[in-house]
Amino acid sequence: MKNILTLAALACFALSNTANATVRVVNNNNPSPGQYATLAAAQSAASAGDTLLITGSVYNYNSLTITKRLTLIGTGHNPSTPNPAPSKLDDIYFSGAAANLFDINIIGLDINSINYNVAGTHRQYVSRCKIRSFIYLGDSQDSILIDGNYFENPGYDFQTLASYDYNN
């Protein structure tokens, strides 16, 4: 009985920590069925821990400077739908205190580059993305998992890596 009560208490705790997370839909197609037409507007409205669901589009979403813990989810680097439109961005940068830039997930986007330019960012996950240029790993990042991505531009170190775990 004690184990069941402990398990129930842990389940309630886990649900209370994730229950406040919100999924915010970003769609820049016109007319836009998404809650937000730009990534900047969605990030401004988001709280730490929220998810930005970025729909496929014929239009580029431009660049994003991440300032808080978020999950970005797109359509994948090679969507297999009747009208395959990727979730395409220019560049992703990081800004602000490194203490706020952890547990960031970047999944299924078509991105020019990702620039880890804030020292101390940690627990980052990049998966199923198409990287057109590069991922820049600056100084003092740790626990960055780069897994299952497609690197388009030959000549960069990560182009042939299917999985790379960068730990200092």
Image (cartoon, helix red, strand yellow):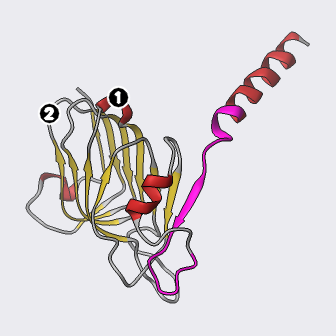
Q: Does the magenta stretch include residue 18?
A: yes
* Disc 1 from disc 2: Cα separation: 15 Å
Amino acid carrying mark 1 in the image? Ala
Spot occupied by residue 166 in the image (x, y as percentages of width and height): 26, 36
Please name whichever residue, 80 or 47, is drawn nearer the observer in this view of the structure: 47
Quadrant position of the N terminus in the picture: top right
How many residues crowd mark 1 within 10 Å: few (<14), some (14–19), many (20+)?
few
Q: Residue furthest top?
A: 2
How many residues crowd mark 2 within 10 Å: few (<14), some (14–19), many (20+)?
few
- Residue tagged by mark 2? 139
Marks 1 & 2, CB-CB < 8 Å contact: no
Which residue lies at the image location 43% right of the left edge and 41% below the top edge? 69
Spot occupied by residue 9 in the image (x, y as percentages of width and height): 78, 21
Quadrant position of the C terminus in the picture: top left
Q: Read off the magenta span.
A: 16-33
Q: In this view, does 71 lie to the left or right of 98?
A: right
The vertical placement of 31 against 50, above or below, is below
- Residue tagged by mark 1? 99
